[in-house]
Image (tube, helix red, strand yellow):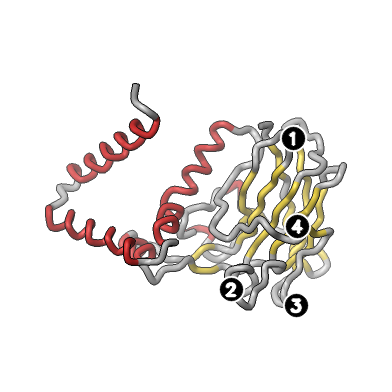
Amino acid sequence: MSTRSELVIQDLVKAVREVLWRHDVTFEEYRAAVGFLMKYTKGPEFEVPLTCDMLFNATISDIEMKHRKGSISNLEGPYFLEAVPEIADRIKTRGEQGDELIIEGRVTDLAGNAVEGAQLYIWHSDSQGFYSGFREDLPTDLYRGRKVIGPTGAFHVRTTMPAPYTIPHDGPSGELLGFLGRHPWRPAHVHFKVRAAGFVEHTTQAYFAGGQWVDSDCVEGVRPALVHEPEERGGAKVLKINFVLDPA
């Protein structure tokens, strides 16, 4: 009996061969493609996972939802960090940069019951599109935090609006985007991860309606159900989002 790895690899090879036949790819084109792939061996380590995430991560998230009934999952991205400060009701930001953003909602099970004790991780870029912990001038206690959910399941967190940013595009990943006629921009978004005993870990993102690049995300991660229209409250934008967890 074939292993799962064998079946997947065989189908991948078959699919590539079918594409080569369909487009009558020449030997010169084939060698050029191999030469392009060799650029990854000379580039930074992150280039291979970057390209894989750029092309396939969103699809894997969609496939996961075939087996879930709770909230829609989405990309984790490369900027998640385990060691982040526990927060009460505010994420620490740098000064007063960026418009204020309030994030509120509930964490529940499929029946609507609060999931007390769930760990809600929130992280996003600063107003310039940079992530803390990945720049020397942005320590890891900024623009990210972990909220412990109480008995009602509700949460209310203040932070600032994130900004669009480009993925690294001065290497082969960016060159590949050029071949595809695509830009390197991601729309502004907030990342979430929810962990709770007895439940499947939930990872997702929230995007903002009308935001730049929402309709042409370079990693094709935006899904209609994840695009939110923030309310206005006291000069702040309010993102209302609930997380419904699937049982483990």
- Calculate the distance from the C-alpha at mark 4 to the C-alpha at mark 2: 25 Å
- Calculate the distance from the C-alpha at mark 3 to the C-alpha at mark 2: 19 Å
**Dot in front, 4 or 2:** 2
Mark 4 crowd level (few <14, some 14–19, many ≥20, 10 Å Cα): many
Report the amino acid beneath label 2.
Answer: Arg
Q: Closest to the observer: 35 or 164?
A: 35
Which residue is located at x 61 percent, y 46 percent? 225
The quarter of the displayed image where residue 16 is located: top left
> Is 180 drawn above or below residue 201 in the view shown?
below
Residue contact at pointers 1 and 4, CB within 8 angstroms: no
- Calculate the distance from the C-alpha at mark 1 to the C-alpha at mark 3: 36 Å
Mark 1 crowd level (few <14, some 14–19, many ≥20, 10 Å Cα): some
Residue contact at pointers 1 and 3, CB within 8 angstroms: no
Which residue is located at x 48 percent, y 66 percent? 167
Report the amino acid beneath label 1.
Answer: Asp
Say which label, 3 or 2, has the lower sequence index.
3
Q: Is residue 243 visible?
A: yes
Read off the residue under disc 1.
109
Q: Is residue 208 visible?
A: no
Read off the residue under disc 3.
96
Callout 4: SS: strand
Say which label, 4 or 2, has the lower sequence index.
4
Which residue is located at x 53 percent, y 43 percent? 61
Callout 3: SS: loop
- Mark seen at residue 103: 4
The quarter of the displayed image where residue 176 is located: bottom left
Say which label, 2 or 1, has the lower sequence index.
1
Say which label, 4 or 3, has the lower sequence index.
3
Mark 3 crowd level (few <14, some 14–19, many ≥20, 10 Å Cα): few
Read off the residue under disc 2.
135
Q: Closest to the observer: 194 or 223?
A: 194
Report the amino acid beneath label 4.
Answer: Ile
